[in-house]
Amino acid sequence: MSLIEPKIDELLERTDNDRFLLCTIASKRARDINDMMCGQRDRAAAQSLAVQVARAADKKPLSIAFAEVCEGDVSYDPETIDLKAN
């Protein structure tokens, strides 16, 4: 997945047309995803499960985060800008 999909217009609709809010939400979610993926890589490497390591490295965390925002799987609390999983 590239930055072409999902479309920027679709992403901005989910964040009240605020590109800075979109950046904040996507970066926070990407960091959560990256932390989760690193944990999976460490666990898989300890168990020598190369298949799990390959699956975890398939997509970039930011691409996954943008897809989740576009699909409505991730939203935010307007008061605190904290993420909420839907």
Image (cartoon, rainbow, N blue to C red):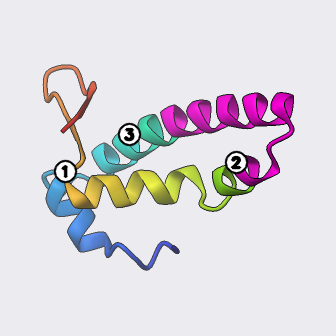
Name the image quarter holding residue 17. bottom left
Q: Is residue 73 magenta?
A: no
Q: Which amino acid is tagged 3?
A: Thr
Specify which label sits upstream in the sequence, 2 or 1. Answer: 1
Real-space Cα separation, disc 1 to disc 3, in angstroms: 10 Å
Q: Which amino acid is tagged 1?
A: Thr
Q: Is residue 38 magenta?
A: yes
Real-space Cα separation, disc 3 to disc 2, in angstroms: 29 Å
Name the image quarter holding residue 10. bottom left
Residue under label 1: 15
Residues packed near mark 1 inside 10 Å, few (<14), some (14 to 19) or many (20 plus) = some
Percent across and percent down for residue 5 are 40, 76
Element type at marker 1?
loop
Label for residue 52?
2
Percent across and percent down for residue 27 are 47, 41
Residue at the spot 16% in from the left edge and 27% down from the top edge: 77
In-image side of 33 versus 41 (left or right): left
Q: Which amino acid is tagged 2?
A: Gln
Label for residue 83?
none
Real-space Cα separation, disc 2 to disc 1, in angstroms: 33 Å
Residues packed near mark 2 inside 10 Å, few (<14), some (14 to 19) or many (20 plus) = some
Nearest the viewer among 70 and 18 is 70
In this view, the residue farthest toward the top is 80
